[in-house]
Image (cartoon, rainbow, N blue to C red):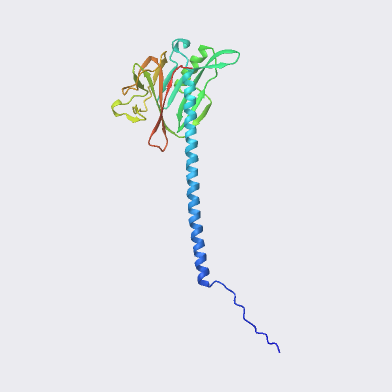
């Protein structure tokens, strides 16, 4: 007689406590992983925003450099000033070249409009009477020029003109209270309405950057350089660039 010995089957499993511990560990790993991923995404967004802001600053400075290089001498404008700078506003007369056509003149205006740096241009023309009227309208703020936003993060816009071995500040300010930015002495400007009117002359900036800043209002006929100070919103520092006038 053959007898069969039956052995009970034993299946390995997890107890309730082990299951709860495993779920707790999985939850902790999920939370830690999410926080790490969230930090990476926030850092990426911050870097992207900084890169976009820097590209906006570079675009504004590149356009300023191109316009300053094409600045027209005052002799071509009946001896009238061809560049006027005030805190938050820059007005200049530049030449415009067209293929197969004579050069024309165009008025360009930069403004800090509610934290946005805008650039406006008039219609290019060779009629001095039209240009004189457009210039006066732009100075008084009555000109209706189409504006293009170059930079949307501008807290303040300041200008200095290089003439006679000194930087002439637009809008005034105490040179002794100037703040040093990027090895260049910047005098604080006020909201004065008086502008620095500059008839650009020939020549070039020579020698090291001076530390003497002359108060406005001033009128010079031999300015060869323009210093632009762009103070960025929500930032402690400032961006400073210098451009040659009429070098193009």
On the question of residue 94 being in view, the answer is yes
Res. 142 visible in picture: no
Question: Where is residue 48 shown, x and y percent of the image?
Answer: 50, 40
194 left or right of 147 in image: left
16 and 168: which one is in front?
16
Depth check: give the residue in front, 216 or 226: 226
Furthest residue in direction right, as rendered: 1
Give the image location of residue 224, x and y in percent: 41, 17
Most extreme residue toward the left, as rendered? 176
Q: Quadrant of the N terminus?
A: bottom right
Q: Residue 230: name its quadrant.
A: top left
Residue furthest to the bottom in view is 1
Q: At which x and y percent is residue 169? A: 36, 23
Tell whether 146 sits left or right of 160: right
Residue at figure coordinates x 51%, y 12% from the top left: 129
Q: Position of residue 44 (x, y in %)?
A: 50, 44
Tag count: 0
6 shown above or below 33: below
Residue found at the far front of this picture: 1
Frontmost residue, 103 versus 193: 103
Q: Is residue 239 above or below residue 97?
A: below
Q: Is residue 74 above or below residue 120?
A: above
Q: In terms of depth relative to the viewer, which is nearer, 227 or 247?
A: 247
């Amino acid at each position: 007689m053959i007898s069969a010995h039956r052995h009970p089957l034993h299946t390995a499993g997890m107890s309730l406590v082990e299951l709860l511990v495993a779920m707790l560990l999985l939850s902790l790993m999920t939370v830690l992983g999410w926080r790490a991923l969230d930090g990476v995404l926030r850092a990426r967004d911050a870097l992207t925003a900084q890169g976009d802001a820097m590209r906006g600053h570079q675009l504004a400075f590149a356009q300023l450099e191109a316009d300053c290089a094409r600045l027209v001498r005052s002799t071509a404008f009946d001896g009238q000033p061809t560049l006027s700078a005030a805190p938050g506003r820059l007005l200049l007369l530049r030449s415009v070249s067209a293929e197969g056509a004579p050069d024309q003149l165009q008025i360009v205006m930069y403004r800090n409009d509610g934290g946005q740096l805008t650039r406006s241009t008039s219609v290019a023309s060779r009629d001095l009477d039209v240009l004189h009227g457009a210039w006066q309208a732009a100075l008084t703020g009555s000109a209706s020029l189409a504006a293009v936003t170059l930079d949307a993060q501008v807290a303040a816009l300041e200008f200095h003109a290089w003439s006679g071995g000194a930087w002439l500040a637009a809008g005034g300010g105490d040179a002794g209270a100037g703040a040093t930015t990027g090895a260049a002495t910047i005098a604080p400007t006020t909201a004065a309405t008086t502008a620095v009117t500059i008839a650009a002359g020939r020549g070039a900036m020579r020698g090291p950057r001076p530390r003497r800043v002359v108060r406005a209002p001033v009128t010079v006929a031999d300015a060869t350089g323009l210093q632009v100070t762009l103070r960025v919103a929500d930032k402690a520092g400032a961006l400073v660039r210098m451009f040659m006038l009429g070098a193009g």
